[in-house]
Amino acid sequence: MTMNESPYPFQSTAPKVRLLRDESAAHPFGLAVAAAWTCYGPRPARVENVLKLMDESLDEPGDETRPVRRKRAQRLYRDLFEAGHHTTMQHANFVFALDGVSRLAIWSFFHHHPHYNSEQVSQRYREVSGKAMVTPELPEKLQPIYESAIERALLGYHRLTELLTPDLTARYTAVFPARVKAKGPDAEERVRAAVQKKAQEVARYVLPLATPAHLYHTINSLTLLRYHVLANQLDVPGEVRYIVNRMVDEVLAVDPYFLGAPGYPLDLSVLGEDDTLEYETLANLGANLNQNNDEAFFRQFDDGLDGYDSKLVGFQPDAERTLADAVRTVLGRTAADLSDPDAIARVLDPSQNRYLAHHLFLAMNSKLMQTMNHVPFTFQKRISGAEEAQNQRHRGTLSSSPVLTAHLRQEPDVIVPYDVTRVPAALEEYHATVQALWDAKNQLLNAGVPAEKVLYLLPNSHRVRFYETGTLLNYYWKWIKRLCYDAQREIFETARQETAQVAEVLPGIGRYVNRPPCVVRSEAGQTPKCPEGERYCGVPVWRNYDPATLAERRVL
């Protein structure tokens, strides 16, 4: 008997399990209708039966039943949509391979919601060649301004990579002396490649949002319908609208009923940019969508941070009691049976809860760990676009990212990476590159170029201001992953600030959330302590761990 072969431990007939394979990807109409029929039928409806019903070539002369049933199915698809029974439209999933998509489009649209999965090329591990950059159509006399700024950014990127290499090499040597001393061309190449990745990770902060990426992007049928309606949102409607139209065309090629059957179209009125909620609201406020010269908002927002990059602005003061009560409720126990500290520890102490160190992060499915959903946090954040692109991948911590066209400033407004500040020549090159991009952005705006086209010149380092909310369950996973020294430094620092503030206001919870993965695994008795394999940071953080010294022990 294999690990997946087990006897059905009941006297009743065993359930049947059938993988739908490519039916769900190729036929969203058929799957939605079959799912709806399943709600009322004696057994799961089959997608292939719906598809056969739609095939008019299978109609037999004199059979009036099939055409009637076909119309009912066609009408049902529209009725499900209009009535809001959208769960039927979430079974169909599409995997798109996208290439040449700007970082701006990915950040502002394709990753600006929780219902997707992406794997995209990393600017950390892959050097940017700059051979092809996303370039909007501009008047002929203005095109050189845009192209020169792109060239200057690429030059700055390569210069920074070179300027940062000596300092990073020295620090890498301090952490991995054995690797540096190892003999042979392979050993030397491994060291060179490791330092190169670190240098380009930092240098990428000056790359513009016009930099293209390739990715796998998976969404369900309902999400694609939403894309279809809202692809003209502010910031990058031109590029996004083109890509979404191609996505829809790809689906229609295999399922012509995706947008509704003949005579029963879905109500999918495509919103133009000036029809969107954000545009109408800004217009009503009299905002200038091409350049925001009013600095009052930025002063007010930044003053409210009190020196933090991510400030805790919302939490429940009685969250620890709520969490403990929830734990006791799951177990059917009283406060006399299980004190608040003991209840919290049962969920958050790795020595008592080995799920915390499991590779799959089992919290979403564990009844006890689901109690972490009752502890919410809200943070006011000001981080770089580079960090926000990583931050979006934690889809359980939801943010309200800004309309960038309403956040443009006359002077550079960027984050300066820690590694750049260590090297004076690199710092000078960094500011010069950013200034070149900013000058070109201002010049094009002053010449009347629409802001959505100029946004492509913003560097990855541009500041993004927003609010973010999530529960302890989702933040916990995010924090332990980003407190790892392998995490890029800016998001590491953000996680450190957030966990320190939580520990201050909710010490009973906070004492458990400021640990990187190796410390959690050590406390849970798991080996190896570091789960990163060859990506091990070189510092045994779990030994004599003290969250107060976490930042100062980081070398790279």
Image: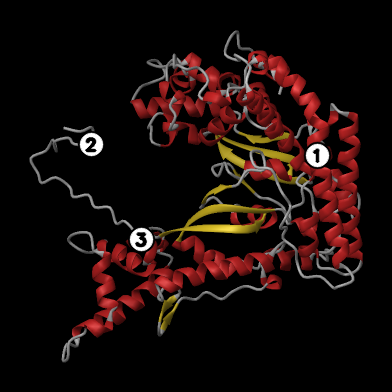
Cα separation, mark 3 vs mark 2, equals 24 Å
Cα separation, mark 1 vs mark 3, equals 44 Å
Identify residue type, mark 1: Ile
Percent coordinates x, y for residue 157 in the rendering: 79, 43
In primary-sequence order, the first of circles 3 and 2 is 2
- In the picture, the quarter occupied by the N terminus is top left
Percent coordinates x, y for residue 545 in the rendering: 61, 12
Give the residue displayed 89% in from the left and 55% down from the top: 294
Residue placed furthest toward the front: 184
Q: Which label number is shown at residue 24?
A: 3
Are dots 3 and 2 in contact, CB under 8 Å? no
Front residue of 398 and 449:
449
Give the residue displayed 77% in from the left and 20% down from the top: 170
Percent coordinates x, y for residue 436 in the rendering: 90, 51
Front residue of 232 and 287:
232
Q: Which residue is tagged 1?
A: 415
In primary-sequence order, the first of circles 1 and 2 is 2
Up the image or down, 458 lies above or below 35; here it is above
Cα separation, mark 1 vs mark 2, equals 51 Å
Up the image or down, 248 lies above or below 4; here it is below
Give the residue displayed 41% in from the left and 76% down from the top: 256
Give the residue displayed 53% in from the left and 36% down from the top: 474
- Kindly state the secondary structure of the residue where label 3 is placed: helix
Q: Which label number is shown at residue 4?
A: 2
Percent coordinates x, y for residue 278 in the rendering: 70, 63
Identify residue type, mark 2: Asn
- Kindly state the secondary structure of the residue where label 2 is placed: loop
Up the image or down, 345 lies above or below 72; here it is above
Mark in front: 1 vs 2: 2
Residue 512 visible, this angle:
yes
